[in-house]
Image (tube, rainbow, N blue to C red):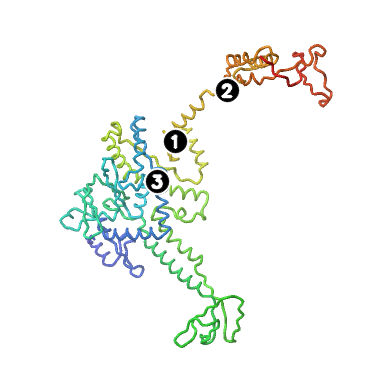
Amino acid sequence: MAKPTTFVDRLAARFGFSRMIEAVNHRSEERGWVYAQAQDSKVDLSSYDRTRLMALSRKCFYNNAIVRGAVRDKALYSVGSGIGIRPQAMTGDQAWDDAAEAWWENWSRSPEISGRHDMRGLQMLVSEAIDRDGEIFAILTARQDGAPAVQIVEAHRIESPDTAANNGGVVDGVKLDKFQRPLSYFIGEGDEYPRRHREIKAEAMLHVFEPERADQVRGYPAVGVALNSILDRDELLRFEMMAAKAGSSIGLVIKNNTGTIGAEGFFGDLSKDSNGNLTRESMFGGGLVPRLKTTEDLQSFQMNRPNEKLDKHLEQYIRAAAIGLGLPYEFVWDTSAIGGVAQRFIIQKAARTFAARQDVLINSFLNKLWAYAIANALRRKELPMNPNWRNVTWQTPRSITVDVGREATARREDVKAGLLSLADFFGEQGQDWKEQLDQISSEREYGSQDVEKPLIDSIGVGGSQALTDMISAMGRGEISPEQASILLVSVFGLSSEAADAVARNATQPVVVSDSENTEAPQLSEPTQSTELALPKKRKRLYRRKKVEKPTA
């Protein structure tokens, strides 16, 4: 620590006061001495302290449902489903972009060297490791056939070699140059000690973490800031559970003047002390009517633990864990106390946390992975050369919201007004805007294709009358079914099968009278006649009658 230089500084250090900043004043009657120092991050968090912090964080992740659920939810909302965060090649050559994206999707099924994880699984693992371990590493490697692959290395494997000769410029497993740039990483291999160490050049290693200081070389868990609160809560709950179990095991209490109940007991022998007096009894069955002495009192035992006050007290520990992960308490644990505007604010705050995590995944992991994998595909001639092959953006999953309908309407209006691009509009839904526009165009093209219209729509009113007259003529035997079928195909455009069916099933109208009655009769009551009144210009009265089919 820097030594006080001026007289005022020495005086302040001697008597424990500051000229301006009240926080650095120390008054023993108000507060105990708080140790603090200002130095490099590698001194503030030594290799041992970082490893210990990571071990405690993993223990909480394995045993505390709140920590585990919050860490996994953060990864889930950041990565999404399917293949996770997806690439969108932006070279300007649509054909090449489509081919590169298809190649990536195929490679994403098994990008990891062990074959255990797909691309989405890798993204989930990386996000969870940042919060649980503070960091994660990935080696850019290749399979035996030369295909690109990535090997995940967890944080506890990166460590400084034990031999002093190899530790020049090495800080916690990372070899640095004079500008503090990583040159290589040392990986501890095997489980025996001392371990063997393999040195990996920085160009072949992806180091993913969220730095909080400019000179930070290694990452540390986000849960670490709340570890004490989390461990205190778990311990308090464990003791409270022990007390609750102990209280629940006691049914009744017998009180008397002496505090003993003799050798025989009240309900029967179970256990006795050194003097032969009963110390604990048990009762089985129901319907017991005890008789007490005047000096005895039989009471039920009641314990008010745990209670609502405990829940209120434990809330602060959960808040500490949630805030340490950058998530609102209400999102992690309880949303019952908020609603409306407050709920939307909480969701938006959580969404910003997810967006920040997506930026880390894209900038520190996916961009570099894309460059390595696509370069390998170009070298292997699995993709044609394109000078802009590095140009890529990433499609993140749909943003979290509590008011889908309202926000969707607002976004559509923004698109109409030119205030929101289609890329942003579809991007908020977790969709590729190019794929969606292609799909919409395809659907519109399919819907605009010529669809065979009904015959009545195609031939119009005049054609309908001509068709009716032709069928009537066929029914009267003036034309044969074969002739009618030819006319239906050539003139009216029916298929041969449809024309044959119409010709076979044509019905012949029968003339009831053509001389005696030239006018339709006046019907006084609809029930007195089954005859149908037709317009006068037809001059004929028809009755539906089944007739024999004419022969050709």
User: Which sits in the foreground, 500 or 471?
Assistant: 500
Count residues near mark 1 (Cα–Cα under 10 Å), then give few for <14, some for 14-19, many for 20+.
some
Count residues near mark 3 (Cα–Cα under 10 Å), then give few for <14, some for 14-19, many for 20+.
many
Which residue in the structure is indicated by mark 3? 79
Horizontally, residue 116 falls left or right of residue 424, namely left
Which residue in the structure is indicated by mark 2? 453
Mark in the foreground, 1 or 3: 3
User: Which sits in the foreground, 475 or 312?
Assistant: 475
Between discs 1 and 2, the one toward the N terminus = 1
Horizontally, residue 88 falls left or right of residue 13, namely right
Classify residue 551 by image quadrant.
top right
Q: How far apart are labels 1 and 2 at the CA level?
A: 41 Å
Screen quadrant of the N terminus: bottom left
Residue 128 is situated, as x and y percent measured from the top left of the image, at 37, 52
Determine whether the residue tagged by mark 1 lies in a helix, strand or loop.
loop
Residue type indicated by callout 1: Leu
Q: How far apart are labels 1 and 3 at the CA level?
A: 24 Å
Residue type indicated by callout 3: Val
Please give the name of the residue rendered at 56% of the width and 76% of the height, measured from the top-left corner: 284
Please give the name of the residue rendered at 22% of the width and 57% of the height, measured from the top-left corner: 195
Give yes or no for contact between labels 2 and 3 (Cβ–Cβ under 8 Å): no
Between discs 2 and 3, the one toward the N terminus = 3
Q: Which mark is residue 420?
A: 1
Determine whether the residue tagged by mark 3 lies in a helix, strand or loop.
helix
Residue type indicated by callout 2: Lys
Residue 10 is situated, as x and y percent measured from the top left of the image, at 24, 64
Determine whether the residue tagged by mark 2 lies in a helix, strand or loop.
loop
